[in-house]
Amino acid sequence: MKKLLTVATLSLLFASGGRATEPPEQYLDPRQPVDQRVADLISRLTLEEKATLLNHRGSTVERFHIRSDQWNQCLNGVKWNRPTTFFPTCLALSATWDTNLVQEVATVLSDEARAIYNGWHLDPKAPGEHKGLIYRAPVINIERNPYWGRNHEAWGEDPFLTGRMAVSYVQGLQGNDPHYLKLAATLKHYAVNNVETDRQKLNATVSERMLHEYWLPHFYDAVVEGKACSLMASYNAINGTPNNINHWLLTDLLKGEWQHPGFVVSDLGGVRSMVEGHENKQMTYEDAVAKSLMAGCDFSDKEFQEYIPAAVRSGKLTEARLDDALTRVLRVRFRLGEFDPFDAVPYSRISPAVIDSAEHRAVALQAAQESIVLLKNQNQLLPLNAAKLQRIAVLGPLADRVILNNYSGKPAATVTALQGLRDRVGSQIEILTTRGAVVGGTRHEWVEEPAEAAVDTAAEMEKAVALARQADVAIVFVGTTAAVEQEGRDRTSLGLSGNQEALVKAVFAANPRTIVVEMSAGPLTVPWLAKNVPALLQAWWPGEEGGHAIADVLFGAVNPAGRLPHTVYASEAQVPSLDEYDITKGFTYMYVNGQPLFPFGHGLSYTTFKYGHLKLSADKIHTNDTVAISVDITNTGKVAGDEVAQLYVHQVKSSVKRPGKELRGFQRVRLQPGETKTVTFPLPAAKLAFWDEATHGFLVEPGRFDVLVGASSADIRVKDQINVLAR
C-alpha cells in the first residue's frame, strides 16, 4: 500500500507555514509495532469510515485507499472465476487421518490464494476476480447429525479428530512466518451448528457439560493452538440466546478465557436474523447492530455500515467497543501485510503459475488416494488383477460424474471414475458402461454443476444388468450429490436416494463379483449392501483427481488406508431425535446404542498388521502428569501399506455417564512387508477429564482408566490400565 499524503496533512502543512503539526503517519511505518500502527490509523478515521471498514462488503475508504471487501472462500479449493486446484471434500480429507497431508493441502490452498492476490496487486487489470486475504475456512462444526446437509464441509463426529485436523488446516492457511500472515483463517460456524432446517431461527438446547465436552473443544484447539485469526458466529441460538448477540460465547469465553486476539464475523445475514429470524420482532436494526457489537461480533454486513453511527450517537454502542472491534479486524489486516510495501511480504513472491500446477494436482491425487476407505473385502475380491480380466462393467449414476460443492473453486480438468479406469487400464481391458439409475433429489442453485440428466430408468437398469452379465466384474458407483445434501438442505434419509439400491441388487443378482463404490459426503446406511455385496468402498466426493485415485485403489497400485471419521449407523431408528443435543442419548461412537453398520475409525487394507505389547511410561500418574503410550506395529502381509493406529481411553468407574471410548491419539504409519515401527502417543491426564457442572470446570477423577490401542473404535488390539492418583 502506498504512503498517502492526506488532505488533513496538507491542511496542517499550509496552516503552519510548511511545518507539519499532525503526528507522523505511523500506520504506514513497518518498523512500528502492529498495535501502535492500528491505533494510529483508527485515530485518523471518522465514525462513518470506521463503520465502513466493519462492513465486510463495504466500499473503499477513499481518503486512505483502504478496500473493505477483502474476503473469500477456499474450503477444498480456492473460489475464483478461473480454475484452481479442486481437492476432496473436508470430510474425505479427515478420512485420511493424516494431519501432515491436511496441512500440505491447506498450504496449496494458501499458495493459490496468495498467487491470485499477488497477480492482482502487480497488475490491477489482470484477468480474474480480485480477491483479498481473509478466507472463510475451515468449517469445523461437529457431525452429531448424520442428516446434516453440510457434513461434507466438516471433519467428522469426534471433537479430538476435528481439533487435530483444524489445527493442521489453519496452520497451512496462515503460514509460519513470525511476522506476516499468509492468509487469515475463519473458523465456521461458532457454535453448536449442524442443522440446516430453520437455521436462522433455530435454538439449540445444550447442557453446560455437553457444550464444553463436545461442542467446543475443537474450536478451543483451533483458536489456542492453531491461532485462527477469526471465527464466524453461527445463525442459531444456544439456550435461547442467538449467537450473534451471545456475550458469553463471543466475549467471555472466546476473548476472555481463550484470549483470542482476532475478530468475530457474523454469518451472512446474521444481523438481519436478529430482526427477522429469532422472533425478536421488537428489535430494530440499530438495536441489532448495537447488541451484536456489544456482545463481541466485530465484523458484519451492510447493516454495520448503515447503523453503527446512529448506534454510537444514541449511546447504544460505546465508541470504546467500536474501536476494539476495528482494532481486531485491522490487526489481522496489518499482519497480512496490506499496509506494508508489497515486496516486504515474503508471500508476495508466490507466482500465479502455481495455480492448479502439476505439483498441486499431485497433492490432490494423494489426498484422494489416502481418503478412500475399504469397508468390506470378502474373499479378497480386491485388488483386481488386470491380467485376469478381459471385460469390466462400470455402472451407476456417479461413474462418470464429479461432484462439486459451493465453497470451492472451478476446477480445470476433472477425472471421473470412468475416465480414471480408462486411463489406468488402457486398451488392456474392455470397459462396458451405462448409468443404470438416477440419484434423484432437487438441483441446488448454489452449486455450479449440471443437473442430472433424465433417463428411462427401466431401460437403463435392464442395460446395466445385461452389461454386468457380460463382464468379469461389475463396479457400481452410487452415492449422493448436491441435490441430496448441501447447504440449506438436510438429508431426508440416510439410505441411497432414487433407484440406486435397486440397481445394486439387480447387478449383484446378475454378477456376484460386484464391487460398490460409495461416493457420498455423509454416511450411508445401506445394510443390504453391507451384508451381500462382496466388496464395498467409500470414496466420498474425491476432487479433481478422484477418478485416478479410485482406479489406483481398485487395481492395487495404492493400498487403501482411509478410516471412517464418523459412525455409519445400522438403521435410521438407531439415530436419536435431531433436536437432542446431548450425545449421551445415543449419538456417535462414544454413546451409540447397539452395533453400528460400520464403526468410527473403521477401514480395511490389502495387507495385515500385528500390534505388539503396549508399553506405558508409568502406570500411576497424578492429575497434572503425562504418560507416554507406545506400541510396536508390524506389517505381517505381502504388500506395503499404511496403518492408522488409534488410541482410546475409558474411565472404568465414574460419577457421571462417560463414553464407552474416547479418541485421544492417532498416527498414520507407512510399513513395508515385514517392517516394524514403534508408535508413541503422549496422553496428558487433562485429556481424561470431564466437565463438572458443580465447579464449572474440567475435572479429572482419580481412579482407573482403560488405555486401548487398535485399528478402529471397535477393533482394539492391545490394552492396559493407568491409575490416576489424587494430589
Image (cartoon, rainbow, N blue to C red):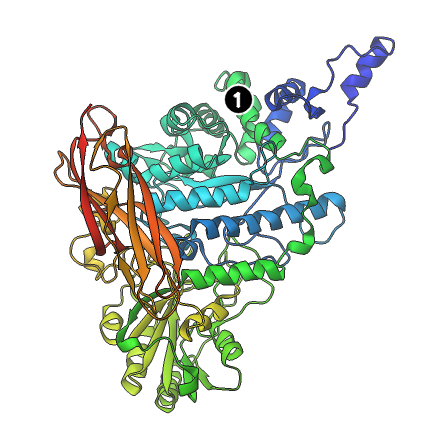
Instruction: Indicate left or right for 54 with 474 as reference.
Output: right
- Alpha-carbon neighbours of circle 1 within 10 Å: few (<14), some, or many (≥20)? some
Question: Where residue 176 sits: x, y (%)?
Answer: 56, 38
- Residue wearing tag 1: 324
The answer to whether residue 693 of the structure is visible from this angle is yes
Q: Residue drawn 43% across and 68% down? A: 558
> In this orientation, does residue 401 appear?
no
Task: Tell me where residue 423 appears, x and y as whole percent.
Answer: 53, 77
Relative to residue 284, is residue 380 drawn left or right?
A: left
Extreme residue in the right direction? 17
| In the depicted structure, whether residue 35 falls above or below residue 707 | above
Quadrant of the rendering where the C terminus is positioned: top left
Name the quadrant of the N terminus: top right
| Mark 1: secondary structure | helix
Give 685 or 373, whichever is nearer the viewer: 685
Picture layout, residue 647 above or below residue 554: above
